[in-house]
Image (cartoon, helix red, strand yellow):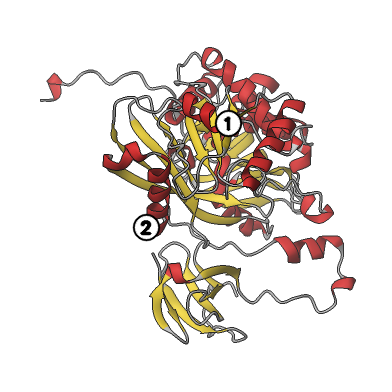
Amino acid sequence: MLLIACPWCGERDETEFHYGGQAHVAYPPDPEALTDAEWGEYLFVRANPKGEFAERWVHGAGCRRWFNVVRHTVTHDITAVYAAGQQPEDRNGVTA
Amino acid sequence: MPDQLPEHPDWLWRTPDPKPSYDVVVVGAGGHGLATAYYLARNHGITNVAVLERGWLAGGNMARNTTIIRSNYLCEESAAIYEHALKLWEGLPEELEYDFLFSQRGVLNLAHTLQDVREGTRRVGANRLGGVDAEWLDPDEVRAFCPIVNTSPNVRYPVLGATLQPRAGIAKHDHVAWALARKADAYGVDLIQNCEVTGFVQDRDGRVVGVETTRGRIAAGRVALAAAGHTSTLTDLLGLRLPIQSHPLQALVSELLEPVHPTVVMSNHVHVYVSQAHKGELVMGAGIDSYNGYGQRGSFHQIEHQMAAALELFPIFARAHVLRTWGGIVDVTPDASPIIGPTPVANLFVNCGWGTGGFKATPASGWVYADTIAHGRPHPLAAPFALERFTTGALIDEHGAAAVAH
């Protein structure tokens, strides 16, 4: 089980959280202008790296707030936790 | 001491060095990759084929699944391909001359809620119309078919009924892989282990004409990925983005027990699936971990949840001990259906996205993929599963419909 440091509540067990997948996927500013392929890519395609991954979690059993985490998808090492709307510090290899 | 050991049995396949060039290079020597190579040779006469495996043969999800075989899917595109697989399974032990313990002991999908009952009876109707054997059992019939299931009304989620596919069952997964490998090898296919693909060779027009590997460059007329949870690590090298997410999926076995469990029981609602292997272990599958992961291990709380479900359904298991747990990496698509076919990159084919249910499809997956590779266009059973569906929106939505919770 992961130990996740909620930015507001501190370290809690993974079972208090829900996963939100890749972080920093912006809603297209002008969806009507997208082709079907571009819209399909926005809807269905997310990064799936073997390595560091910027992802969203929500503390459902705590403060119920969304935030971002940089986690390694093999080792599960969490190297950054930051608020929704913020960007991770510049680091090589992070799929933001 | 060495002189007291028996002779090593004959190897089932050769261990060749890679040749400089092949007509088809299959990436991944799991069940699907091996079946693809076998049917390329058997059905299409294409034998100048290599299957490259970064680890050892059938050491990924083929070694980590719960061996359940069934075809009782709701959507007709899914039922068609899984039923094709089941019909192939029924003939494969004889065809491959290998008794891999295929046992059609039936699969029960339990219903615990009114919604489960409606979903189950609807699926039974759809299956019958589609030529897939299916029956609806009431709780008494469930108890008669599988006496160890707790059908008491005094549990949190009482059994209200179940679907039964009598022709469904289990097979010994390792032996399936070895049987396919032996026959593919006999056709002249090179099975090359410890050979990881690290890049693709492309010509000036972007066509894939080979692969870079840890054992050097290998030219290829066509390259066919069968790499399950690691598919996107390969396609990322080409800048080809696929709608798959890789998750850990766990299973476990108990110690060896007397035969107590006559069939396969699956329950979406309390979420566990249980069979008993021929050797005697209870084999149980859990849910996927929610997060993306490649670590081939999962969270302990998933195991805890799964054991709670198993004990609710099977009080008789209360004293059984867990022998070992493990995880595989499953490639999940947005509609929980596979992606099979050509890609926007010429000469590159994908067969991925089987998610939590690829083992049962092994022969049909290989059959349609081999045909697709041989002819450069989708096999009719594979056509609905093309990558284009994520542009057209013609999804095959098996989430919640496929008789398993994902």
Q: Which residue is mark 1?
A: B138
Vertical side of B101 occupied by B271: above or below: below
Residue B368 in the image, given as x and y percentages of width and height: 70, 31
Q: Which residue is mark 2?
A: B300
Q: The C terminus of chain A is located in which quarter?
A: bottom right
Q: The N terminus of chain A is located in which quarter?
A: bottom left
Res B187 quadrant in image: top right
Amino acid on which disc 1 is placed: Asp
Vertical side of B344 occupied by A91: above or below: below
State how far apart marks 2 and 1 are (Cα).
Answer: 34 Å
Q: Is residue B300 left or right of residue B99?
A: left
Residue at the farthest front position: B154
Q: Is residue B68 left or right of residue B206?
A: left
Residue at the (38%, 22%) spot, across then down:
B11
The earlier-in-sequence mark between 2 and 1 is 1
**Chain hosting mark 1:** B
Q: Nearer the viewer, mark 2 or mark 1?
A: 1
- Crowdedness near tag 2: few (<14), some (14–19) or many (≥20) residues, C-alpha within 10 Å: some
Residue B329 visible to an observer of this rendering:
yes
Same chain letter for marks 2 and 1 = yes
Amino acid on which disc 2 is placed: Phe
Residue at the (29%, 30%) spot, across then down:
B257
Q: How many marks?
A: 2
**Chain hosting mark 2:** B
Residue at the (27%, 21%) spot, across then down:
B8
Q: Is residue A13 left or right of residue B46?
A: left
Which disc is residue B53 wearing? none
- Dot 1 falls on a residue whose secondary structure is loop
Residue A49 in the image, given as x and y percentages of width and height: 55, 63
Residue sitting nearer the eye, A79 or B19: A79
- Dot 2 falls on a residue whose secondary structure is helix
Res B379 quadrant in image: top right
